[in-house]
Amino acid sequence: MVRLSRVLLKEAGLAIDKTLSEILVCPLQTTLEVRVCEKTKSLVSDTIGVSFPIKDGIPCLVPKDGIILDEDGDASKAS
Amino acid sequence: MRRINSLYGRIGLLKRKPEKTTFLASLSFSTDGGYGGGGESQQNSSRVKIFDRDLKRVHRDRAAWLSRNKNDTFVDAVAENLLDRLEDCKKNFPSALCLGGSLGAVQRLLRGRGGIEKLIMMDTSHDMIKSCRDAQEDSVDNSIETSYLVGDEEFLPIKENSVDLIISSLGLHWTNDLPGSMIQCKLALKPDGLFLAAILGGETLKELRIACTLAHMEREGGISPRLSPLAQVRDAGNLLTRAGFSLPGVDVDEYVVKYKSALDLIEHLRAMGETNGLLQRNKILNRETALATAAIYDSMFATEDGTIPATFQVIYMTGWREHSSHPQAKRRGSATVSFTDIQKQFGGQS
């Protein structure tokens, strides 16, 4: 029960923990930062326009998991 | 016989899965098809692909379920040996990154060694990471702040100069570009950070290699690759120097694991996620050939007590990110004392 609530809390806050947010970068271009997008529950690498999902509070940064954002989709997220 | 049947049935199921993902890959982001081959500057110019990383990911998903709540003595021995090296260091490593392979064993056996405060666990398989997280949440010891991450060792998503220690236990031998991955590890380390890795070496499963070859020759009149090409010991030192680690250290250990039969060996390999992940593998393994392999293995290598041995050669690599405190070789020709004078001074006889 405790575990469940902890998982739920993680889901609600979504914020990936501080350690990760400090050191994670885009796997395709390690000079680029990734930002957390709360709305789509993903990590977005803006410059190359790829979003990586966060599943169960675990960010998935395998290049193959990334989704290329469309131009208009990207614009709406950026706002 | 039925058992083998069901096992291959499972492989058949697994094989279908990557095909589905490749279909999706046309929509989602795919590493295939020349990303980085064009204008992108990549560190590695040679893009030879030996291993099927997507298949390996599926293998590791399966391994997460097969190894659930089970402690594997071989994997534990390797992890223990690797972590033992942390006790030899005077330095503390506040932040550590643990890469693929036997993650669970490393996490379980760490026991406060190396003064690690923040641990980041990374694997290509989401299920593997989840089972690690579940195991950690069930355990009482929560002194280390642990974060979880799904990532590929070939595309390390870690900022430069950000961790003090990188541990990789039995994972890096599945990377297509081992030097490239090690260079990425080096970049992720802070100066004077430590890189610790254990990979399987060329002598690994030599019995199975022989048995497979003989059975294939006998039953199919030719051979196809069933076992990965693995690094040799002499390569390991070169790898470390090429990646630019200072104070490189390599040592080798051989473990002989005994199994009841060759099928138990294969079952163990599955539980470790170490089954054939070659890109150019033969996707069909004839049942006859499989049985012949088991029979040849048994007749050639079985010991008196009826068990069959399997050799695992593990290469341990240690390297540090360069730092001003490390000993440096003097510039050539900068010596002021002749060796003959030293010899005269100390060793008169010889």
Image (cartoon, coloured by chain):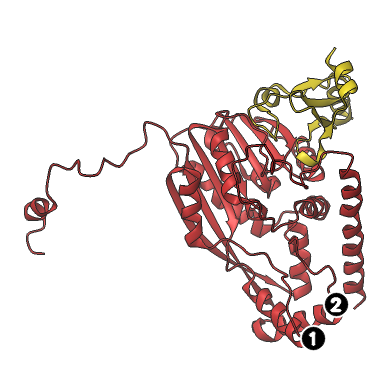
Chain colours: A yellow, B red
Give the amino acid at mark 1: Arg
In this rendering, the answer to whether B311 lies above or below B124 is below
Dot 1 falls on a residue whose secondary structure is: helix
Residue B178 percent location from the top left of the image:
60, 51
- Residue B286 image label: 2
Outermost residue toward the front in this view: B39
**Residue B18: x %, y % from top left:** 87, 53
Considering depth in this image, is B339 or A79 the residue closer to the camera? A79
Q: Is residue B143 above or below residue A13?
A: below
The chain that hosts pointer 1 is B
Residue for badge 1? B219
Q: Nearer the viewer, residue B335 or B257?
A: B335
Q: Does dot 2 land on a helix, a strand or a loop?
A: loop
Q: Is residue B306 visible?
A: no
Vertical order, B248 against B222 (above or below): above
User: Which badge, 2 or 1, is on the more N-terminal residue?
Assistant: 1
Cα distance in 3D space between marks 2 and 1: 9 Å
Task: Give the side of residue B102 with respect to residue B95, left or right.
Answer: right
- Evaluate if marks 2 and 1 touch, with contact meaning CB atoms under 8 Å apart: yes
User: Where is residue B159 drawn, in percent x and y?
Assistant: 62, 29
* Image mark for residue B7: none
Toward which corner of the image does residue B307 lie, by quadrant? bottom right
* Image point (81%, 80%), residue name: B289
Q: Chain of mark 2?
A: B
